[in-house]
Structure formats: structure tokens, C-alpha cells
Amino acid sequence: DAKTTQPNSMESNEEEPVHLPCNHSTISGTDYIHWYRQLPSQGPEYVIHGLTSNVNNRMASLAIAEDRKSSTLILHRATLRDAAVYYCILRGNTNAGKSTFGDGTTLTVKP
Amino acid sequence: DTGVSQDPRHKITKRGQNVTFRCDPISEHNRLYWYRQTLGQGPEFLTYFQNEAQLEKSRLLSDRFSAERPKGSFSTLEIQRTEQGDSAMYLCASSSPVSPHYEQYFGPGTRLTVT
């Protein structure tokens, strides 16, 4: 499985944008980039996914580099409830959804 | 609430005992996954089912672990002769046959403590 690399931790101030980076230099052409987040004492929660084009949904935006070797999850206005561990994972068409989660980025949001 | 549910939420057992966890996926989700998560680490894939068929097992799933999904609905994960190293959060997830690229919905997990 192709691997992803994320910073261990990041901090943000409340109501400011947050850019969470992810490197995936060994991504294959059919791998989708998925982001999940995990709040304390809960299971992971799907955030967003994309293949090549930037994507937006109600939770976040996903910006994918042109060479697809990196991506950035963008939270437009961080709230205290966004404090969580954010995981960037790759998912191909042939691995039936099993995922290799790294250790993710722990986001701290300061009031 | 129609999310993924897991039972029990917490389990404390003594080393050497057997434990069984249950997962109820979102109805009509045909894929079901088990993960294990230790403190400070991301979830590690254990096994997954498509309907009642167990299609893949991780090398992490030793002979002491067995998972079933007899009717393609709920699933159980049994650990025999528990060891202290089995202490972890056990997460279940499910996905729909029509979800884009296997978007997974996770349950709250079962926290196992082996003393």
C-alpha cells in the first residue's frame, strides 16, 4: 500500500483557516485520497475524498497538487469542535476499502 | 440512530480469558471491517467481510482471533486466551455497495483492557 506522511501535530486559532498537509509521493494513478478525522473517544469520521480535482463539501475543502504527490485539507474557519486527529489515507479500486491509517495529525484549536 | 453500533463499549478481562465483541453495521451496508487501534496510533486493519464472506485477513489477526458475519448483517470478533498486548480499541466500520470508493462509517469502538 502506498503510504502517506503527515506532521504529528498542528495548532490553530479559533475562527482561522487551517491547512493540513499530506505527502503521498508513491500514490498510484487509481488511488483516491481520503481524509478522516477522529474526535476524542470516538471512531474515525469521513471528511472528504478526491482523485485529481479540488473538492469541497460542507465540512472542508481538499486541494490536490497537480502531480498528486501531496494534498491539503482545508478547514475554512476552525472551531473548538474541529480539534481532532486528522488522517490522510489512500484508497484504490482494488483494495476493497481496507485502509492503512498512519498516525495522523493532531490538530489543537486555541480559543 | 442508524449508525454503526458496537457492544460492549468497554471490556475488562483477565489474561487468558476469551472475549467476544459485536458490531451492527448500517443496514444494507454489505461491507464490514474490523480495525484495532492502540493509544497514539492510527487504526490498523484486521479483516473485512463482503456480505457473509470474509475476504481478507491481516497478518495482525493471529490464530487467537476469529471473526464471523453469519448472515451478512452483524459481525462478531472473538479473541481467545487474551494477552495483555491485546489491550486496544477495536473499531468496526461498514460501507455501502454504492458509496464512492468505499467511504467507511465507523462505530464508537470497544475498548478492551486485559489485566
Image: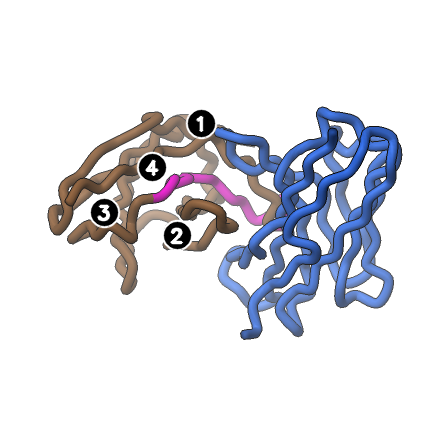
What residue is shown at x 39% (from left), y 30% (from top)? A24
Circle nearer the viewer, 4 or 3: 3
**Is residue A34 shown to the viewer in this render?**
no
Q: Nearer the viewer, mark 2 or mark 4?
A: 2
Q: Is residue A17 left or right of residue B34?
A: left
What number is the disc on residue B12? none
Identify the colour of chain B in the image. Answer: blue
Examine the image and state in which quarter residue A72 appears. Answer: top left
The residue that label 1 is drawn on is A26
Main SS, magenta residues: strand
* Amino acid type of the residue that numbered disc 3 sits on in the rendered structure: Ile
Residue ID for mark 2: A49
The three-letter code of the residue at mark 1 reads Thr
Q: Which residue is mark 4?
A: A68
**Residue A91 on the magenta span:** yes
Q: Which mark is residue A74?
A: 3
N-terminal-most mark, 3 or 2: 2
Look at discs 3 and 2 and give the one toward the viewer.
3
Q: Residue at x 48, y 47 (%)?
A: A41
Which residue is at the front of the view, B98 or B110? B110
